[in-house]
Image (cartoon, grey):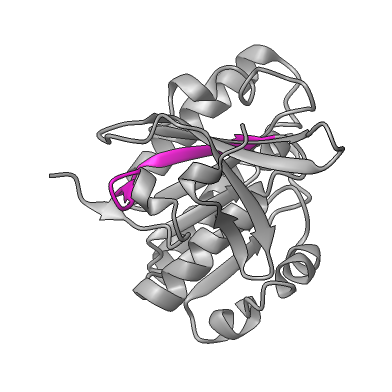
Amino acid sequence: MTERVPTGIEGFDDLIEKGLPIEGVFLVAGSPGAGKTTFAAQFIYEGATRFAEKGIYVCFAENRDSLLRNLDRFGWNFNKLEIEGYISILDLFTTKEPGIQSNLNLILEKINEVGAKRLVIDSFTAFSMALTEPADVRFLIHLLYRFLKKIGCTTVMISDMPWGSQRIGLGVEEFIVDGIILMQTKFDDEGMLRRSLRIIKMRSTHHSKQTYEYDITDNGIQFFPSDNKKF
C-alpha cells in the first residue's frame, strides 16, 4: 500500500485516498484568483500544525513580506512557526538565469538544515521566466523533477495558466509530475465568480473523476458538498 501525506485541506484528502503519495511531485495549476497559493500554503501550514511535519515554502512569484501579508487573513501565523522551526520561507523572488543551480543548492541546504518533509515551489512559472529558449525550459523541468525526487520531500509546485488557456503549465511538466490538481475560475450567468477543482492525474491513487466547487474562506479553502456542484 502506498504511504500517503494528508494535505489537511478538509474534503480534499477524501478525493485522493486520504493523501498525496509520499515524496511525490504534484503540480497545482490554474488561472489567476483560483487560490493556488492558498492551497500550497495550507498544505505547509496544516503539515506543521496538525501532523508535526516541517515544511519549506520557496517564493519565486512574490517576496516573503507580500506572502505573509496575504496569509495573515487566514490566521496562519507563519512567523511563529518559523521561530519554532516548523516552517521556513525561502525568498528567491529575484532569481535570474545564472542563479538557477545555486538556487537549487540553497533549497537542498535548507531542506537538510530543517529536516523538511513538505516543500512548495511558488511558482515554477516564475522560476522558469529567465529562460527564453524552449529547449532550456524543457531541460530545467527534467532537472527540477530529478532534483525533487531525490530530496525526500512531498512537493507541491504551482504553475500559472492565463485566462482562457487550456494548456497546463508550459505543456511539458504535466507529463513528468506525479499528479496534477487543476484549479479554475469562471463567472456564472449572474456574474458571480465561481471556483472549481479537478484532479487530472494522480499516480498510484484511485482519485475522484468529478469536478468540485470550492471557495476561499477566512479559514482557507473550503469544498462545497458534492451534491451542490455547479460545474
Residue at (28, 46) in percent of width and height: 17
Percent from the top left, x then y, of residue 192? 82, 42
Q: Is residue 179 left or right of residue 96?
A: left
Q: Quick check: 229 above or below 35?
A: above
Q: Considering depth in this image, is 128 or 23 the residue closer to the camera?
A: 23
Percent from the top left, x then y, of residue 57? 58, 60
Asked where in the image residue 33 lies, by quadrant, the reply is: top right
Percent from the top left, x then y, of residue 16? 34, 43
Q: Is residue 218 magenta?
A: no
Q: Considering depth in this image, is 193 or 71 the residue closer to the camera?
A: 193
Furthest residue to the right?
A: 191
Q: Is residue 23 magenta?
A: yes
Count of marks placed on residues: 0
Percent from the top left, x then y, of residue 159? 63, 35
Q: Is residue 82 left or right of residue 65?
A: left
Q: Is residue 124 visible?
A: no
Residue at (47, 69) in percent of width and height: 46
Q: Quadrant of the C terminus?
A: top right
Q: Quadrant of the N terminus?
A: top left
Asked where in the image residue 24 lies, by quadrant, the reply is: top left
Asked where in the image residue 98 lies, by quadrant, the reply is: top right
Q: Considering depth in this image, is 144 or 2 the residue closer to the camera?
A: 2
Furthest residue to the left?
A: 1
| Residue numbers of the magenta segment | 16-30
Q: Is residue 11 left or right of residue 190?
A: left
Q: Is residue 183 visible?
A: yes
Residue at (67, 14) in percent of width and height: 134
